[in-house]
Image (spheres, rainbow, N blue to C red):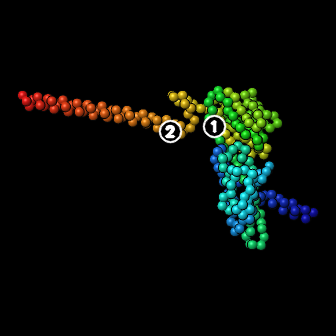
């Protein structure tokens, strides 16, 4: 009995001492680094896995990759470029190293990659979220005027709205309205957030062009400055012409008086 108690305590200690996955956040189209921060003297093998497949296998400086967007940097850091929705989820990095030159030991690190995206949609158009549902268990929506999260899609039941369609993992909201703005988040079966998408409504400027970001607003300001420059030059030229005219008038009057 005492032996079983010891085994149970040992098992509980192992579970408790296991470090949680490192949380990493990246934006669609950008890149992210899974840092190993290893102090090993000599690393033999670096292996990156996901629950469904092997991503990268490097032996010394020779690497075999299942995805061309994944690279090894330095001794064991991993870089994922051109992030897409399906990259979100859990990763396991196994580093085989030798510190005492006698035994090769594995070190296992876990990461949880969260993808963030920002989308602007014009009223009446369709909002397409391609690849959003690949690893999803459910999708929730929080409107900009509410703090409540509402389920709009669940695995096994599909969409919960007449304007939503699910076609092979691609979620589409037809006839976009103001009530569709806000935040959409994708969760897995463990209620871990995979993806967060912030959706806003596009507005039109006085030229009929879409204004989606602050950068566009900056561009409009620059255009306004370009318009102000010619106007300023014109005003200066008018003032100079008026000054010349006044000087010439005074000179004519002076000559006329001097002649008299």
Q: Position of residue 36 (x, y in %)?
A: 69, 59
Q: Quadrant of the C terminus?
A: top left
Residue at mark 2 to residue at mark 1: CA–CA distance: 19 Å
Whether residue 253 appears in this view of the structure is yes
Q: Nearer the viewer, residue 105 or 11?
A: 105
Which sits earlier in the primary sequence, circle 2 or circle 1?
A: 1
Q: Which residue is mark 2?
A: 218
Q: Residue at x 18, y 29 (%)?
A: 249
Give residue 149's mark.
Answer: none
Q: Residue at x 75, y 31 (%)?
A: 165
Q: Which residue is mark 1?
A: 119
Q: Is residue 142 left or right of residue 242?
A: right
User: Is there CB contact under 8 Å for labels 2 and 1?
Assistant: no
SS at mark 2 in the image: helix
User: Given the current orientation, which residue lies at the most extreme left position?
Assistant: 260
Whether residue 177 appears in this view of the structure is no
Q: Residue at x 65, y 44 (%)?
A: 28
Q: Position of residue 219 (x, y in %)?
A: 50, 37
Q: Position of residue 200 (x, y in %)?
A: 62, 34
SS at mark 1 in the image: strand
Q: Quadrant of the N terminus?
A: bottom right
């Amino acid at each position: 009995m005492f032996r079983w108690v010891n085994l149970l305590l040992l098992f509980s200690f192992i579970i408790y001492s296991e470090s949680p996955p490192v949380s990493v956040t990246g934006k669609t189209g950008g890149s992210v680094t899974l840092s190993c921060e290893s102090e090993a003297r000599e690393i033999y093998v670096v292996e990156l896995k996901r629950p469904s497949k092997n991503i990268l296998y490097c032996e010394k400086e020779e690497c075999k990759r299942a995805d061309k967007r994944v690279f090894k940097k330095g001794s064991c850091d991993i870089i994922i470029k051109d992030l897409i929705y399906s990259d979100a989820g859990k990763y396991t990095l196994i580093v085989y190293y030798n510190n005492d030159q006698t035994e090769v030991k594995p070190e296992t690190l876990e990461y949880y990659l969260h993808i963030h995206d920002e989308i602007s949609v014009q009223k009446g158009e369709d909002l397409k979220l391609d690849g959003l549902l690949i690893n999803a268990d459910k999708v929730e929506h929080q409107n900009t005027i509410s703090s409540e999260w509402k389920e709009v899609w669940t695995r096994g039941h599909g969409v919960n709205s007449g304007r939503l369609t699910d076609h092979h993992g691609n979620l589409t909201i037809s006839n976009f309205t103001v009530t569709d703005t806000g935040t959409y988040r994708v969760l897995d079966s463990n209620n871990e957030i995979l993806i967060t998408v912030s959706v806003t409504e596009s507005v039109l400027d006085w030229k009929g062009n879409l204004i989606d970001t602050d950068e566009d607003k900056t561009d409009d300001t620059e255009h306004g400055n370009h318009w102000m420059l010619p106007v300023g030059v014109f005003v200066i030229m008018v003032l100079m012409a008026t000054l010349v005219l006044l000087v010439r008038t005074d000179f004519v009057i002076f000559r006329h008086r001097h002649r008299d």
